[in-house]
Image: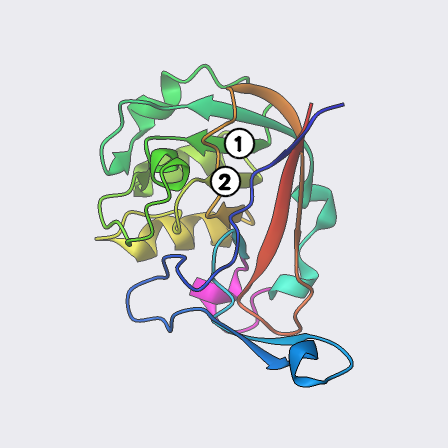
């Protein structure tokens, strides 16, 4: 068994969505100051690094929050596909050319985005690749229940709302901020467990692939 960690390391330098507060990690108890233990304070939004979106994030109202997402969807067989030549929009044509088996329910999209994680680029990139609205409709129509992307949004930067709403309204779980730079295309078992935060629109997660 080989375990691949596809989670980003949470650190102050990690890019965050423009307008969101930066990640703060601060030790509030230090053994070198005579305390019995080291204790670190974390301050950030729930949408940092590798994280899961809940329907409440873009649908509001009585939509599901993160603690009620299905663990059966968040763990199980997954397909990683490599889309090396996409622009800022991952389109229906891109997905149809990706040889995605009809039985796929968990789909992880590896793109040029992962190169930024591999090189340690900590500057937010507005030109990341993500599914456009038509691609989101395609994912829903083809029975995808979880879609993972290798940057901080499952929708293009210039148009963040439509793809999110299409996927979340259909019960598709977006996993954002995956590091797929070292992952070969193919079949794996995914385990993605977001923090169980009551009433939250999302949560950071530790995600691994097992082969």
Q: Residues within 10 Å of mark 2 (few under 14, many from 20)?
A: many
Q: Give the residue number, with chain letter if any, for mark 1.
A: 107
Would residue 22 appear left or right of 49 to someone viewing this image? left
Would residue 71 appear left or right of 126 to someone viewing this image? right
Evaluate whether residue 202 shows in this view: yes
Front residue of 81/161: it is 81
| Callout 2: SS | strand
Front residue of 5/83: it is 5
Q: Is residue 79 above or below residue 193?
A: above
- From the top left corner, tell me how far across and down residue 37 is, in percent: 75, 77
Q: Give the residue number, with chain letter if any, for mark 2.
A: 148
Instruction: Find residue 77 and report its image quarter.
Output: top right
| Callout 1: SS | strand
Q: Quick one: quadrant of the C terminus?
A: top right
Residue 54 belongs to the span the image colors magenta = yes
Q: Quick one: quadrant of the N terminus?
A: top right
Contact between labelled residues 1 and 2, with CB atoms less than 8 Å apart: yes
Tell me which residue sits at (48%, 55%) in the image: 49
Residue 193 belongs to the span the image colors magenta = no
Tell me which residue sits at (27%, 28%) in the image: 86
Q: Which comes before the other along the chain, label 2 or label 1? A: 1
| Numbered disc total | 2
- From the top left corner, tell me how far across and down residue 114 is, in percent: 39, 35
- From the top left corner, tell me how far across and down residue 144 is, in percent: 54, 35
Evaluate whether residue 102 shows in this view: no
Q: Is residue 171 above or below residue 119?
A: below
Q: What residue span does the magenta drawing correspond to? A: 53-64
Tell me which residue sits at (65%, 25%) in the image: 188
Q: CA distance from mark 2 to mark 1?
A: 6 Å
- The circle drawn on residue 81 is none
């Amino acid at each position: 068994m080989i375990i691949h960690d596809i989670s980003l390391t949470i650190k102050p330098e990690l890019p965050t969505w423009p307008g969101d507060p930066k990640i703060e990690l601060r030790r509030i108890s230090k053994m070198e100051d005579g305390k019995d233990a080291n204790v670190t304070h974390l301050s950030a939004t729930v949408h940092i690094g590798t994280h899961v979106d809940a329907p409440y994030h873009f649908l509001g109202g009585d939509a599901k929050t993160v603690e009620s997402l299905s663990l059966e969807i968040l763990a199980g067989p997954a397909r990683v596909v490599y889309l090396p030549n996409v622009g800022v929009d991952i389109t229906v044509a891109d997905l149809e050319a990706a040889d995605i088996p009809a039985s796929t329910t968990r789909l992880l999209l590896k793109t040029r985005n992962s190169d930024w994680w591999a090189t340690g680029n900590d500057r937010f990139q507005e030109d990341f690749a993500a599914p456009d609205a038509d691609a989101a409709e395609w994912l829903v129509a083809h029975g995808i229940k979880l879609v993972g992307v290798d940057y901080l949004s499952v929708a293009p930067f210039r148009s963040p709302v439509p793809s999110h709403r299409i996927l979340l309204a259909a019960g598709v779980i977006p996993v954002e901020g995956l590091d797929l730079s070292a992952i070969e295309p193919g079949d794996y078992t995914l385990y993605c467990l977001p923090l169980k935060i009551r009433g939250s629109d999302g949560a950071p997660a530790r995600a691994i692939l097992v082969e």
